[in-house]
Image: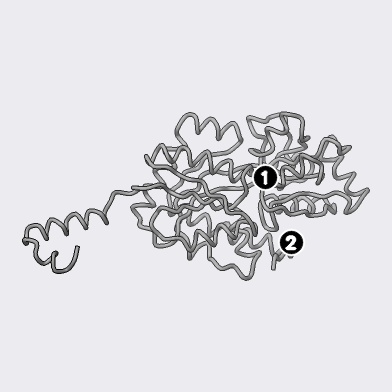
Amino acid sequence: MTKARYRALPPGLIGLACLFAAAGWAQPYPSKPVRYLVPMSPGSGADTIGRIVAGGLAQALGQQVVVDNRTGAAGNIGAEIAARSPPDGYTVFQASMTHATNASLYSNLTYDLVRDFAAVTRIASSPSIVVVHPSLPVKSLADLVKLARAKPGALDYASTGAGTATFLAAEMFKGMAGVNLQHVPYRGGGEAITAAMTGEVQVYFAPLATALPLVQQGRLRPLAVTTPKRLPALADYPTVAELGYPGYEAGNWYGMLVPARTPKEAIATLRNGVVAALNIPAVSKRMTDLGYVSVGDQPGEFAGFIKSEIEKLGRIIRDLGVKAN
């Protein structure tokens, strides 16, 4: 509409036009699909939980939630994309322990996990399981240690990149057991689990959700779980700690972040949506079956947790003397 025609409108119609324009800018959230950024590859543990939660969140929000896998650089590429996204609630980012580790591991990150994001909620925690390819002549963790000591550097272990949960789990075990396993990083969990399954690498400290189906099919051999205590659903699997490495604990957590300055109302809606999704019976069962422990804490609680994780994992990285760049 031209300025001349707009001025020609009666005052009442001008006011009505302004009212409709304002209403267009004040649509209830969410009024369009939400992009769910997962910074790991399809088939990975992160992707599995992302798709489970996205499906439940779509039901809770009444809008489509589209999973967008942006892989590479141990999750940093996806984080950078998320940090630069508009703070409007329509891009959510699934962070993990890996990103808290990256804060100390990388010296040239283009994002800050605390400054550039606002916390929504911690979705779940995830244990890991030590698996080997069935062709490897080991039946127990003790056998693995014995073979690794007999052939230093001859065994490879997969990870989803330096600083990721799979990397730290293996490196902490190497230090405690005094063995030399060679690190082979992959772009994501899908590639890493495939490498373990095909025998390209011999060992993988794998996310339980990713490895369990393959263990059940006999395509990977389980040796131990990385939790402090045995998992009720997997009571036959011993822990690394009880097999002679007291204090050993490893795993991962997943949580939802949004770009900093996202409206608090959108954050509250998203957090409530995630909690509602986790309480959907089918979602809850799926999470439990895969070994996830649902959380759903408040934004402030999750923000404090992230800060504590950055400090704790930073100490581990410094003790290991690891740097990615």
Which circle's residue, 1 or 2, is located before the other in the chain? 1
Quarter holding the C terminus is: bottom right
Where does the image place residue 299, in percent across and percent down from the top left? 43, 52
Asked if 178 appears above or below 11 in the picture, the reply is: above
Quarter holding the N terminus is: bottom left
Q: Amino acid at mark 1?
A: Gly
Mark 1 or mark 2, whichever is nearer to me: 1
Report the residue marked by disc 1. 190
Number of callouts: 2
Left or right: residue 308 versus residue 278 is: right
Q: Quadrant of residue 135?
A: top right
Disc 2, SS: helix
Q: Amino acid at mark 2?
A: Leu
Q: CA distance from mark 1 to mark 2?
A: 26 Å
Where does the image place residue 83, in percent across and percent down from the top left? 49, 62
Q: Residue at x 61, y 56 (%)?
A: 75
Tell me the colour scheme of the image. Answer: one colour
Q: Residue at x 47, y 44 (%)?
A: 296
User: Which residue sits furthest bottom?
Assistant: 108
Report the residue marked by disc 2. 320
Q: Residue at x 64, y 44 (%)?
A: 44
Left or right: residue 325 versus residue 273 is: right
Rate crowding at label 2 as few (under 14), some (14 to 19) or many (20 or more) other CA atoms within 10 Å: few
Left or right: residue 152 versus residue 212 is: right
Where does the image place residue 163, in percent across and percent down from the top left? 67, 58
Relative to the observer, which residue lies in front, 178 or 15? 15
Where does the image place residue 183, in percent across and percent down from the top left? 78, 54
Relative to the observer, which residue lies in front, 266 or 195? 195
User: Which residue sits furthest right?
Assistant: 150
Rate crowding at label 1 as few (under 14), some (14 to 19) or many (20 or more) other CA atoms within 10 Å: some
Q: Quadrant of residue 110?
A: bottom right
Q: Residue at x 89, y 51 (%)?
A: 154
